[in-house]
Image (cartoon, rainbow, N blue to C red):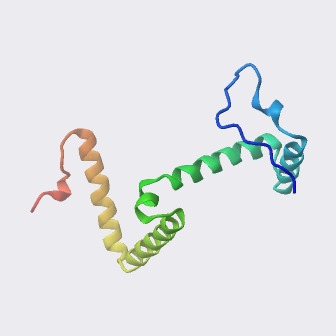
Amino acid sequence: MKNKPEKKKSESVNAAIPPWFDLPKTFYRNLAAYAGEFGLTTAEFLNRSIRHYAKALREKESPAAKALGSAEFTERFKQMSAESAKAWWSKITPEEKSARAKKAIESRWAKKRGQGKSPADKPE
């Protein structure tokens, strides 16, 4: 059994030496292989990977994930909410959808004009 080297608890950041100089050759081989597998340049693959990883960390630390207990439950909740909304909107007539959209647009423009409520909200 190999002894794994101890991980440093806190590495000091040295801006003079970029971190990629410390990466092993296997990192670059894997990077090229994965980028090629998906038809991306290595730079594009790294950019997308960083964004994806940051998004995953944000979702893991989101208030919904904390309230529901895990990112898995959060994802299930999102799917359930989307399916519920889709089912609800499928039951509304096209005329009612149009009326709701018109009311929302009027309300949005009224707020921009500083009028507060839209004319659609006023009783007739």
Q: Is residue 15 above or below residue 120?
A: above
**Residue farthest to the top?**
16
Asked if 16 appears above or below 117 in the picture, the reply is above
Q: Is residue 112 above or below residue 38?
A: above
Which of 43 and 93 lies nearest the eye of the viewer? Answer: 43
Q: How many marks?
A: 0
Which residue is nearer to you in this view: 38 or 53? Answer: 53
Query: Seen in the image, is 60 located left or right of residue 112?
Result: right
Q: Position of residue 77 (x, y in %)?
A: 46, 69
**In the rendered view, does 73 fall on the left or right side of 30?**
left
- Give the quadrant of the N terminus: bottom right
Quadrant for the C terminus in the image? bottom left
Q: Is residue 52 left or right of residue 116?
A: right
Quick check: 117 above or below 14?
A: below
Which one is in front, 23 or 11?
Answer: 11
Which residue shows up at 70% across the image and 22% down it? 14
Q: Residue at x 49, y 52 (%)?
A: 61
